[in-house]
């Protein structure tokens, strides 16, 4: 991945997170944008998100995010200067869930917190 692509990914991640948390603060409180992967031709971008413990289920959050696409796209077109405005696709990132499950299993193996 080129430095340019990495820079665009981080810029989109920051801007998408900013608009969601400023415009929809109560709905986005349990949401984290974990990464963005823009396609090499810059026409498409996958936006990976995770839901903090106690948040909505992934299907409900996915539908809500899809409903915010017009607002997010409008914000990006105004604040991010690119030749092509990428078409966004939200994807649930379950890596944090897996990491949390592994930590919980390790805690169960060692309940006292003492090292063996």
Image: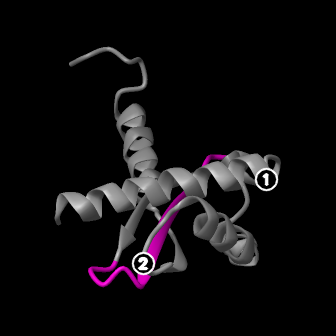
Query: Helix, strand or loop at disc 2?
Result: loop
Residue 57: percent from left, percent from top: 69, 65
Residue 101: percent from left, percent from top: 44, 49
Of 115 and 86, the residue lying toward us: 86
Q: Is residue 55 above or below residue 80?
A: above
Residue 105 as seen in the image, left or right of residue 72: left
Residue 112 sits in which quadrant? Answer: top left
Name which of mark 1 and mark 2 comes first in the sequence. 1
Residue plotted at (46% across, 62% down): 94
Quadrant in which the N terminus is drawn: bottom left
Q: Please tell me whether residue 40 belongs to the stretch shown in magenta.
A: yes
Q: Is residue 53 above or below residue 7?
A: above
Residue 97: percent from left, percent from top: 48, 54
Residue plotted at (82% across, 48% down): 26
For residue 78, say whether it is visible. Answer: yes
Span colored in magenta: 39-54
Label number found at residue 95 = none
Q: CA distance from mark 1 to mark 2?
A: 26 Å
Q: Is residue 50 above or below residue 107?
A: below
Residue 39: percent from left, percent from top: 33, 79
Crowding at dot 2, Cα within 10 Å, few <14 / some 14-19 / many 20+, comes out as few
Q: Which residue is tagged 1?
A: 23
Query: Helix, strand or loop at disc 1?
Result: helix
Whether the residues at callouts 1 and 2 have beta carbons within 8 Å, the answer is no
Residue 77 sits in which quadrant? Answer: bottom right
Q: Which residue is tagged 2?
A: 83
What colour scheme does the image use? one colour
């Amino acid at each position: 991945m080129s430095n340019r692509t990495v820079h665009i990914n981080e810029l989109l991640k920051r801007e998408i997170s900013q608009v969601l948390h400023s415009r929809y603060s109560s709905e986005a409180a349990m949401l984290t944008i974990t990464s963005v992967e823009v396609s090499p031709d810059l026409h498409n971008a996958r936006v990976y998100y995770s839901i903090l413990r106690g948040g909505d289920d992934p299907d409900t959050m996915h539908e809500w995010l899809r409903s915010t696409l017009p607002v997010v796209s409008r914000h990006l077109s105004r604040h991010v200067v690119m030749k092509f405005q990428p078409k966004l696709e939200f994807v649930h990132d379950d890596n944090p869930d897996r990491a949390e499950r592994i930590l919980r299993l390790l805690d169960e193996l060692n309940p006292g917190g003492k090292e063996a």
